[in-house]
Amino acid sequence: MTNALHLVAPVDTLAMDFTRDFAAPAAALFRAHADPDLVRQWLGPHGVEMAIGHWDFRTGGGYRYQHSDDGGTYAFNGVFHTVRENELIIQTFEFEGAPDMVNIEFLWFTDLGDGHSRLRGRSICPNTEARDALLSSGMEGGMTDGYERLDALLPSL
Amino acid sequence: MTNALHLVAPVDTLAMDFTRDFAAPAAALFRAHADPDLVRQWLGPHGVEMAIGHWDFRTGGGYRYQHSDDGGTYAFNGVFHTVRENELIIQTFEFEGAPDMVNIEFLWFTDLGDGHSRLRGRSICPNTEARDALLSSGMEGGMTDGYERLDALLPSL
């Protein structure tokens, strides 16, 4: 197990793949993605405030939230295609600063036993320009920060 | 203008792109995608019966339908990320025979004036295996059939 974020984005695909291990069972990791009172404690870079305006975490539901920091406010929204407890989330993802550039995201949760779990993710961009913009936006640093915050939150669950 | 289906699926991407022109204004073409009583008259290959079990055509809504022919019944479902009248539909798409292989689909509607319009589509598969399976499933023939049926329906709208 490694708790480093491992992100791969080969140039010949629209997909970005990542894996991240956590010192918590898959059920706790999933709950931290499901419960908006938990999500807003870790999702996003260090130092942002997260306000969740809409959160309907179920197959066919959707979400909208805002991140705020000294630089401004950034809104995101999407719909949940699949929510399968402790196993899988399939959702769309749109940064409203780049309207209609909608990703589809897959998050697979695997229990590794012994109080550990693995999160595997695939995010697919609508075109290569959108992908390059995301990769150069500090996305990887934001994810790294967010999962560090999640590491700190998980022991309390 | 050509009303032939033009489908491109380069081997180095997860995306399939298509364009198709219609002898109808964009508003009529959009309505044929919006109204379930119209959708079931054209979506799918010649000879299938379409039953729509769920149809909530709005941003944040979703759908589920079944196609039936002599060979069996095939179910599909998805959620609508964006519905923008006469302009854009962004939705997910899952063939339930290949569970969790969820595409994201973009449909752009453009009025060409003079009673004609263009539909441009992009469907992005979660991985290359899913894409190859779709391409070898007769998808292109089914789309060609469906748009011929839509040609026949549009004059009545």
Image (cartoon, coloured by chain):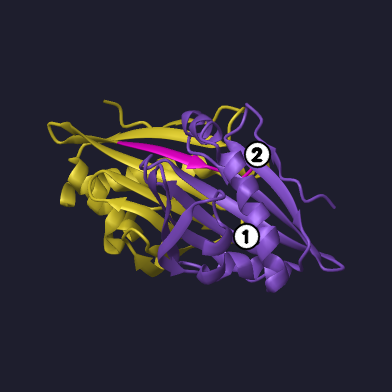
Chain colours: A purple, B yellow
Near-viewer residue (A49 or A141)? A49
Amino acid found under the numbered disc labelled 2: Thr
Q: Which residue is mark 1?
A: B99
Q: Quadrant of residue A135?
A: top right
Q: Magenta: predominant secondary structure element?
A: strand
Residue drawn at x 85%, y 67% is A113
Separation (CA) of disc 2 from disc 1:
15 Å
Secondary structure under badge 1? loop
Q: Is residue A11 above or below residue B79?
A: above
Question: Mark on residue A111?
Answer: none
Give yes or no for residue A116 being in the magenta stretch: no
Please provide percent x and percent y for residue A118: 76, 57
Q: Is there any visible trace of residue A98 in the rendered image?
A: yes
The residue lying at 62 percent from left, 60 percent from top is B99
Q: Earlier in the sequence, mark 2 or mark 1?
A: 1
The residue under the point 82% across, 49% down is: A2
Q: Which mark is residue B128?
A: 2
Q: Quadrant of residue A52?
A: bottom left
Magenta-drawn segment: B119-128
